Amino acid sequence: MSASSTPAPYDLVVIGFGAAGLSAALSFAEATEGRDTPARIAVLERATKEKRGGATRWTGAFLRITEDRQLDTDWADHVGRVSGGLADADYCRTVERETPQVLSFVEKHGVEIAFEPFPLPHTFNGGTPTMNPPASPRGGGASIVEHLGAALENDPRVEIHYETEALRLTTSDDGTVDGVLVRTFDGHTRRIQGRAVILASGGFQGNTEMLTRYLGDKACDLPLIAPGITNSRGDALRMALELGADTAGQFDGIHAEPVDTRTTKADAVLYGFSTGIFVNSSMRRFFDEGRDTWDNTFEHVGYEIWKNQGQEAYWVADAKTLAIPGFRNSLLSDVDPEQADTLEELATKLGIDAEGLEKTVAEFNAAVVPGEFDPTRLDGKSTTGLTPQKSNWATPLDTPPFIGVPLTSAVCFTYGGVRTDVDGRVVTPSGTAIPGLYAAGEATGLFYHAYPPATSVLRSLIFGRLAAHHAAAGQSA
């Protein structure tokens, strides 16, 4: 289709079909309902219809909310603490304020929010370790993609352009963003005009060149945690920088997670590691497995495996971990842990040095201090005279059967991205908003040093919605 066949500009062009883009397009449709002249909305998606949804389709989409449907009251302060004050506090408070409304928004469109039991303590519900069930959409992120996607498909004002790659933004003479140059599935380019554009195409974790540019050595060794991330090519960042946009977030920072190497299943993360030990390829421990609850450490484990352990690690535990009610739910792999009656047999199944493993386990066991082992809280049961120490849940690995999982690190998303204000407008280094241009989700930068988890989907939904509302308010009917 040539540009001349498009009778008028779209009122909104959304780039991306994940949580941020879906929220943006659907929120704009709702905000412009009843106009005398129906709004026209275009949604651009790199993937095919069958593979649409980017990272959102594959995530479990934990939601860091309390049972009264508020954001964890400690989250905004937590982000400030771990970032050393670098993160945008107003942005974080906006996430806090808007959480109840965005939950109602997705539920209205058929997404069911459920609180499911989890076998280990976490800090999702108020900032202190708890066994309260964490929340997520029933069916994970795929539920968001399908329910919100169906609402867009059923709206005659919305046109979805699959297999469409955004190349660059176009501007009018005064610098207002007025469209996107795209490449379609047949390799041809065309201009799609729009009165506003929302960048919602994810970070740059699917682009090895950009990962290497910002992360440096060994970025090419990072597998993707899910297939949809392939389409997170850094398009939003690249196009916005061409217009002089500012950036935010730590550009050499990533959210990495420890995943099972025995499967090709997406998101095969090991969460329930706190009661065992990690060893590297030399059979040496390299991490304090009990320094905090799993949600505050699993990202650091993933980063350490990639950055300093040659992308090879093994998790080992014994019958005491197996006995934790519901423990299997904390391993998202579709393959059960390797299991054996002896450490030697377990080492053989894992393909690692049995003598080295036995030596490390013996040293660990000898360093465990007396005390009551309690996997439901920070129990203070630690080691002494051991480097690295284990601060909680240190119990001797001496009770068969022994279990183990081989691990590598996979990248989930990148920290660095476009800077926006609290309306989702893309801004320049001076703080000036670029007219007509918005961004939401992982295309925008926020985190430094650590990602306090279970908020990526939330912030994507929230800022997609806020950007759409601001764009709609700025257009006459």
Image (cartoon, rainbow, N blue to C red):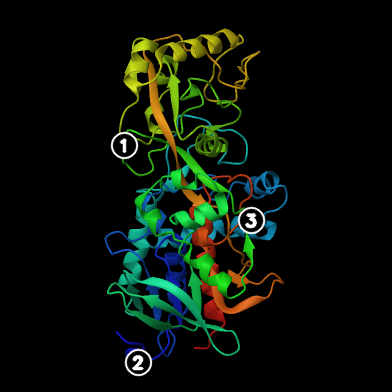
Front residue of 412 and 221 = 221
Question: Of residues 120 and 189, which is closer to you in this image?
Answer: 189
Q: What's the residue at 62%, 65% (across, down)?
A: 419
Query: Which circle, 1 or 3, is nearer the viewer?
Result: 1
Residue located beneath label 2 in the image: 4
Q: Can see residue 152?
A: yes
Q: Where residue 167 sits in the image (x, y, percent)?
A: 44, 73
Q: Earlier in the sequence, mark 1 or mark 3?
A: 3
Q: Is residue 140 left or right of residue 444?
A: left
Mark-to-mark CA distance, 1 and 2? 49 Å
User: What's the residue type where badge 1 is placed?
Assistant: Thr
Return the residue at label 1.
Answer: 263
**How many neighbours does mark 1 have within 10 angstroms: few (below 14), some (14-19), or many (20 or more)?**
few
Between 167 and 263, which is closer to the camera in this rendering? Answer: 167
Q: Position of residue 209 (x, y in %)?
A: 47, 56
Above or below: residue 114 compared with residue 458? above
Which of pointers 2 and 3 indicates the residue nearer the eye? 2
x then y, percent, for residue 335:
30, 31
Please tell me which residue is depicted at 60% across the width and 89% down the height of the picture.
174
Residue 326: in sight, yes or no? no
- Residue, disc 3: 92
At 31% from the left edge and 35% from the top edge, which residue is drawn?
Answer: 334
